């Protein structure tokens, strides 16, 4: 395997998140003395490998119990079925640690007034405090990182963008996830969008979808394009996902791009004035800021 990492140097301090449903676990610890987060995700079954893996001579099984026509087994398959994907984050900022740590959330109703008085200043100060936060985006746009993961590049400074495989996408066409990173660096989030941005938004929607359709001809599922609010990164980007509709969970953070375009066509100031509802984790830096300034009241 190329570029292996010596994981024996990782010292676990804490399991900060786990999901039996999504088969993920997130660990916080140190790697060679540096604070490190490791997020592990079991990969899905590979249709081509599953038969070989089950019948391989080194596959072991033991029966848990039997009841009528049902038999339950624990199978330790050959290595062919045992891949685990890892995302490793070195020296994460406190807000990135919070983002990866499981915590209770609330449903927050953000009026336009709350945005102006509390959320917009929060975003500004976060971007000033964590200047390197969006470096991964600039590295991609500047052609310094993930060059072979770029799916398309439209260099127009106003309407252009780069479509790149999302960090968490395993490459499985039945669960596609890509992000369109805008060339413009002045849009922080959906609240900034207005009529002047329609050429950018329609360009991302049209070219994003046609690129994915052309590149992945066997894709079975419809493509959804949406914008997160609140996003994690305040450099404007759009998500593209194609999954089995039975498997996907949409969240309150998902704003379908077509709906965003249509709302702005109706009202230039739609997102400046709209009330936005989203889930907010109680350990997130936004929650903490809203609590401190009294927008979220203590119980
Ligand atoms: O929640 P938000 O809309 O801000 O989503 C940002 C997306 O960017 C997530 O789906 C992340 O998985 C993805 N992402 C984050 N990082 C740090 C990277 C990265 O370094 N490379 C790529 N390709 N995607 C990333």
Image: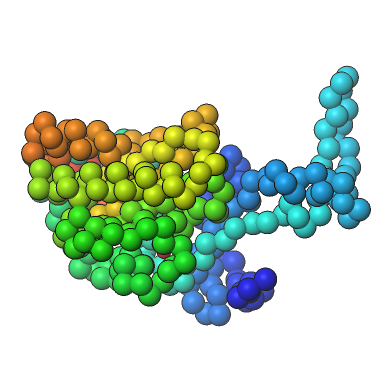
Position of the N terminus, as image quadrant, is bottom right
Residue 204: % across, % down: 28, 48
Left or right of residue 139, residue 190 in this image: left
Viewed as shown, does residue 18 lie left or right of 60?
left
Across and down, in percent, residue 23 comes to: 61, 46
Q: Nearer the viewer, residue 170 or 189?
A: 170
Could you tell me which residue is drawn at 58 percent across and 39 percent down? Answer: 21
**Image coloring type:** rainbow
Visible residue check, residue 51: yes
Residue 99 visible, this angle: no
Q: Position of residue 137 (x, y in %)?
A: 33, 65
**Quadrant of residue 94 in the image?**
bottom left
Relative to 27, 127 lies left or right? left
Is residue 66 shown left or right of residue 167?
right
Using the image as rendered, state which of residue 15 and residue 49 is in the foreground: 49
- Relative to 131, say whether 114 is above or below: above
Say above or below: 128 vs 72.
below
Front residue (pair 11, 51) = 51
Coordinates of residue 44 in the picture (x, y in percent): 64, 46
The residue at the point 82 percent across, 49 percent down is 52
Residue situated in front as seen by the camera: 142 or 121: 142
**Which residue is outermost to the bottom?**
32
Classify the position of the C terminus by image quarter.
top left
Ligand 1's image quarter is bottom left
Q: Residue at x 10, y 43 (%)?
A: 195
Q: Residue furthest right?
A: 57
Q: Is residue 190 above or below residue 33?
A: above
């Amino acid at each position: 395997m190329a570029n292996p990492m010596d994981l024996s140097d990782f010292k676990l301090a804490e399991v900060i998140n786990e999901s039996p449903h999504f088969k993920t676990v997130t660990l916080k610890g140190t790697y060679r003395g540096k604070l490190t987060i490791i997020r592990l995700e079991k990969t899905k079954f590979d249709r081509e490998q599953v038969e070989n893996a089950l019948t391989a001579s080194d596959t072991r099984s033991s029966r848990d119990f039997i009841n009528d026509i049902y038999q339950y087994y624990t199978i330790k398959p050959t290595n062919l079925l045992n891949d685990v994907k890892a995302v490793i984050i070195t020296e994460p900022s406190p807000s990135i640690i919070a983002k990866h740590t499981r915590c209770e959330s609330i449903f927050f109703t953000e009026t336009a007034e709350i945005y102006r008085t509390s959320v917009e200043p929060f975003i500004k100060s976060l971007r000033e405090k964590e200047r390197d936060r969006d470096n991964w985006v600039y590295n991609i746009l500047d052609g310094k990182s993930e060059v072979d993961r770029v799916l398309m590049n439209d260099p127009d400074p106003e309407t252009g963008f780069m479509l790149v495989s999302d960090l968490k996408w395993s490459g499985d066409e039945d669960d596609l996830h890509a992000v369109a990173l805008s060339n413009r660096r002045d849009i922080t989030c959906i609240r900034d969008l207005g009529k002047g941005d329609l050429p950018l938004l329609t360009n991302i929607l049209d070219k994003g979808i046609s690129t994915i359709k052309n590149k992945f001809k066997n894709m079975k599922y419809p493509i959804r394009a949406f914008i997160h609010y609140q996003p994690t990164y305040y450099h404007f980007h759009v998500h593209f996902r194609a999954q089995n509709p039975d498997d996907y969970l949409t969240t309150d953070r998902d704003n379908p791009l077509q709906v965003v375009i249509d709302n702005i066509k109706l009202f230039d100031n739609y997102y400046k004035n709209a009330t936005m509802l989203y889930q907010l984790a109680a350990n997130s830096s936004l929650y903490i800021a809203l609590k401190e300034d009294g927008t979220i009241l203590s119980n």
